[in-house]
Amino acid sequence: MNRISLTEKIDSIAQKDGENPLFITEYFYRDGKPLSQRAPVWGMTLREAGSMRFRWNEKNLHREKMLATICGKKEALSLELIHSKIVLDIKKPGENKNQLADGMITTNKDFVPVVTVADCVPIFLFCPETGVFAALHSGWRGTGIAAEAIKKACEIYGGRPEDFCAAIGPHIHKCCYSIDGERAKYFIENFGSDCVEKSEAPENSRFPYRLSLARANENLLLDIGIKEENIIVCNDCTCSQKNKAGTFPFGSFRREAAFLPPEVDAESRSRSMTVQAAFCGYL
């Protein structure tokens, strides 16, 4: 398994340019080596860029400007997320319009699939044999969406799971993700016992376990046939990771909004966090 720290890359860029970057990109890996040619890149906006929140019935001019900077002449494809395992295949402009789902696959190099994340797991896929690439949003409910995306891609475009490269981007790690017994049982039964561990919380705690979404998705990708050397995993925790300047490079629901009092409604909580755009394409 290839492991990287985007925070280290962010620090390196900041040191070179004298200011923090607004977004970061990275390569897919195949046979343990980065695919730096004839392949899409994946990446995400950073906290410094502001909220990339997206709803079909809202206008986010800041997001539009940021994605135009990132994508250039390519078309950014957006989705309103619903924490599902629904993946869309996008062949023509407008096919994503008003759609509710959590992932997109395509072979069109003029497209840049974009999902939003703020502690949830961004997952990116690329199949060199068929040219399929994807951006997926995997919350805890949506864990398994990567398998759905690969299954759909193989059914529509051919190829095999072992042909795919996968990247797991920055998300909340087990250091900051405590869960209850019911959720622990669900993940152990579906994604392996090694993705859950007992925490140091008191015995009477409502959340006595810690969940590694990275490990759950690693197990999933390996189980469906993706080679270990074709998977890259970011070690960065969106909730706790700080850069050299002592600031948080990533937006986080848990850090920025979860602590708000119970009377704060879900919509207000959503607006309190720095939502990031996670994208994949030929930039």
Image (cartoon, rainbow, N blue to C red):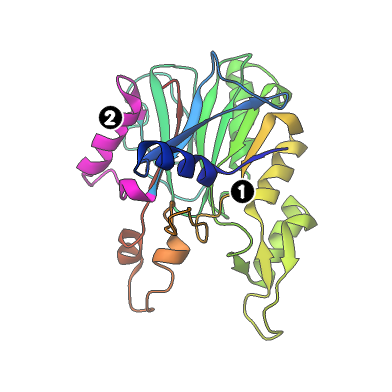
Query: Considering depth in this image, is 39 or 204 the residue closer to the camera?
Result: 39
Q: Position of residue 122 (x, y in %)?
A: 52, 43
The residue located at (47%, 44%) in the rendering is 11
Provide the secondary structure element on which disc 2 rests.
helix
Q: Position of residue 13 (x, y in %)?
A: 43, 38
* 67 in the magenta segment: yes
Mark 2: few/some/many CA within 10 Å (<14, 14-19, 20+) = some
The residue located at (51%, 52%) in the rendering is 120
Query: Considering depth in this image, is 112 or 155 the residue closer to the camera?
Result: 112
Q: Position of residue 262 (x, y in %)?
A: 39, 78
* The image quarter in which residue 269 lies: bottom left
Tags 2 and 1 touching, CB below 8 Å: no
Left or right: 33 in relation to 17: right
Q: Position of residue 88 (x, y in %)?
A: 47, 31
Left or right: 214 in relation to 239: right
Tell me where the magenta segment starts and ends, as one range.
47-76
Q: In which quarter of the image is the N terminus?
A: top right
Task: Kindly report the distance in space between the C-alpha atoms of the residues bearing marks 2 and 1.
Answer: 28 Å
Q: In which quarter of the image is the C terminus?
A: top left
Which of the numbered marks, if any, corresponds to residue 235?
Answer: 1
Q: Residue under circle 2?
A: 68
Residue 223 appearing in the image:
yes
Q: Which of marks 2 and 1 is nearer the N terminus?
A: 2
